[in-house]
Image (cartoon, grey):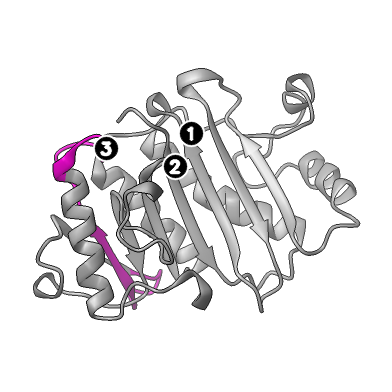
Amino acid sequence: MSRPIELTIHFRSHNHLDVAAMLRELKAFSDALASVSPKLTGWLLKGNTKAEALLYEAFDEVGPRTAAIAVLKEALKNETDPRIVSIWNGLDGAEGASLQYVGRPASETSLVTLRAKPQAFSHDWKAVAEAVQTAARVWSPAVLSVESASYFDHKTFKDRPGVGWMVYLPVILSGPQVPEARAMVPVKDQDGNPLGTIVVSVVDGAFSEANPEHLQIAQAIETRLVDQDFLPRYASL
């Protein structure tokens, strides 16, 4: 893995863009990210300068910090569409990571994006898939993709999300439907009801757009999913 990894979640928000609710959702996801890498912890509110960005921790052990909620409520009091909450892991260089929540009214698509440098992420696909499962339970996304930052230039369909390393879709898929996949992970909600499926392209390490075999597998999965009308267009999200 030479390029940063991006995990992108497309969903419809139903929390009315309440700052505390947005932070609670990010807290639930950040707890899962701690298992992906010890670098994906210690989240701080972003600021205009590094000194500002070191002032406020986003979370304590149980949820959003009161000070973080107050600061964001004041900063976003005149912003409703979109309402953007950005946090970072307090590290620079190859260990840096950021998490951004772009909240829009439920009639529009909201986004949560994790961007993590190589040393702040895992090469273990199972650990990453566990975090993806948590995100699916928190946001019920229309699609969630995990890919290297420059994979956009390689994906098969520019008008649709790519597969990259893995993609979550809110449909129940079986192995025979996507034979090119190296792993298929069913996702269930807290009560054990089916939510969807994670389709994984690479299981022997982290995905890399510099590896022709990785590209070939991901592109083949994209074609297979589009042929069966499972991979949505951005315009329909």
Name the residue at 39% across, 24% down.
119
Answer left or right for 233 relative to 109. Answer: left
Please tell me whether residue 198 belongs to the stretch shown in magenta: yes
Rendered image quadrant of residue 193: bottom left
Amino acid carrying label 1: it is: Leu
Q: Nearer the viewer, mark 3 or mark 2?
A: 3
Asked if residue 59 shows in the view, the reply is no
Q: Secondary structure at mark 3?
A: loop
- The earlier-in-sequence mark between 3 and 2 is 2
Residue designated by label 2: 33
Answer left or right for 66 relative to 166. Answer: right
Name the residue at 71% across, 72% down.
105
Amino acid carrying label 2: it is: Leu
Name the residue at 13% across, 55% down.
182
How many numbered badges does the structure rendering display?
Answer: 3
Residue designated by label 3: 208
